[in-house]
Amino acid sequence: MHTTGFASPAQGYEAESIDYNRLLIKHPAACFPMKYTGRNLKEYNISNGDILIVDSAALPSAGKLAVVMENGVFIVVILEKFSEQKQVLFGYTDGHGCRRPVRNLFGIVTGIVRTL
Amino acid sequence: MILHVDGNSFYASCERIFRPDLLGKPVAVLTNNDGIIISLNAECKKLGFKRGDVYFKMKSEYAAKGVAVFSSNYTLYSDISMRMNLIYSYYAPETEIYSIDESFLFYPDWKNMDWQSLGHEIADTVWQQVHIPIAVGIAPTKTLAKLCNKLAKHHGGVFEWESCDKEKTLSAYPAEDVWGIGPAKRQELAVNGVKTALDLKRMTLSEAKRLLTITGFKTVQELNGIQCIERIPERRRQAIMCSRSFAHGVSTLPELETALADYAMRAVTTMREEGSVCRTVSVYLMTARAYTPEEKEMEYFNGAAVRLDEPTGYLPDIQKAAEELLKSIYRYGYEFRKVMITLLELESDKTAQLNLFEPDDAETKKKHNALMDTVTEINRKFGRNTLHTGVRSCTPDVTDDGKEAAWHMQRALLSPEYTTKIGDIPSAGDPVS
């Protein structure tokens, strides 16, 4: 219910609280949260359990972190240039040092949410 | 020009988004109470399963063929639907949400416009950003756009009226599949020599009106390329809307929920007094309108709608739908000025078409009606809000012994709320090594 009565003396001085959605989410239609369960991304300051903001509208490019679908699971990879073919522009290097094509890109990691 | 956009096997497609293991696998979704198959993807249809299958009778067949079966997860579907609508409103000057997975997009009649490219662009964007496959029908009227949409499913996702062989297309299209006609009219039309959409198009208007009433009259006009079914459908003008502007900005969800519960109650009371039931519920939420660039940052306007399984006048059902919609559009940190509920697709409670596949038993229906009548009566005698429904946020979802509260639907195969509940978000790990 809305309040009635005398206006608060603080009225007119309220600051808008910071909207973290606005900081983290560039494309509301296309951003999905995902939980990172891995240990490979220490150099990106991403730890096991961090929440990733995955943006399916962000453009992929070499060097970006991406979530891709591989063997029935979501994995986080560092995109590399793969080939000039239109179908497979990007690839990644797997745990054995093999270069693999990215065939099912889900989105680009554009943010991390973490509480300490 | 009108584009009709429609998600392919929408519920099943939503279930697949966050399950990479189901890529290319058969998926099916059950109705509210896990009774009937309501949505299946192409892979599942290929195995011979159909919409309307009674699940408990065919459970072993579904299991044997490896179909992933889910309960309806409306929270997920509403969220995905809202995302699609955001993309549609980005692309079109004007949009109308017709159901959870269907919208009409309205464009001026631009000359030399490549509508098919636009259709493909919208479909590609929705696929890339929301991961839902859609079909696009493009035509000068709503009826034709809907017809083109059905054909689009077999034509690479986009079908344009202007670039097809019109007579051939209509003569291959059964009359009862045309929007607004329906299988109930098939027999009567056939007797009068009307079997295909082409026959329907060629009907004289007087005959159309005699056989199909005013709806048929409009359908025939629309098949002839004349816009007759208005952008805002007539029934929306008869929609019941209830809203109030708040004196001060309201920013918390519980406050909005309380207000919305109150408006839902009022809207349902009005609707019942008029002897109507509704099929679609929509909720809109807005801040004060921005007039300067600085204010733009504080502006937020969003709406969402849901089409119920069957027409209803039962307050708890409507309220639950409204609450879920509110949750899906609520954003933290804004000062809201207005919340609004609209009940759409009103029809008489006497003639309301019940869900074909899952008719509520008459006894339950009678009890619901008696309950609602009693509530109305008590509130009339003792004042509005003497009796009201509990707002969900105040009622525990789980009882003391850890069971789901009794009012919950039976949804044993419910998938996680991937996009709306922090404990339910999907996981992404490292590449296997």
Image (tube, coloured by chain):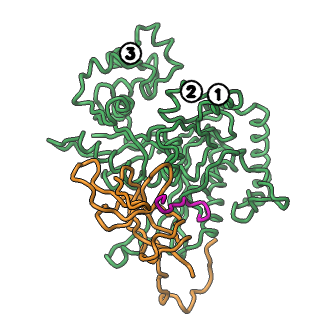
Chain colours: A orange, B green
Residue B358, percent from left and from top: 67, 31
What residue is drawn where x is 51% and y is 12%?
B187
Q: CA distance from mark 2 to mark 1?
A: 9 Å
Residue type at mark 1?
Glu
Q: CA distance from mark 1 to mark 3?
A: 36 Å
Residue range in magenta is: B422-433
User: From the viewer's perspective, is residue B86 above or below residue B58?
Assistant: below
Q: Which mark is residue B61?
A: 1
Foreground pick, B74 / B418: B418
User: From the viewer's perspective, is residue B7 above or below residue B419?
Assistant: above
In magenta segment, residue B210: no
Q: Quadrant of residue B151?
A: top left
What residue is drawn where x is 71% and y is 33%?
B360
Q: Which mark is residue B297?
A: none
Residue B335, percent from left and from top: 50, 74
Relative side of B323 to B409, left or right: left
Mark 1 or mark 3, whichever is nearer to me: 1
- Secondary structure category for the residue under label 3: loop
The quarter of the image holding the N terminus of chain B is top left
Q: Reading the chain from its start, which is encountered first: label 2 or label 1? A: 2
Q: Which mark is residue B49?
A: 2
Q: State the residue position of label 3.
A: B196
Q: Reading the chain from its start, which is encountered first: label 1 or label 3? A: 1
Q: Are tags 2 and 1 found on a single chain?
A: yes
Q: Quadrant of residue B264?
A: bottom right
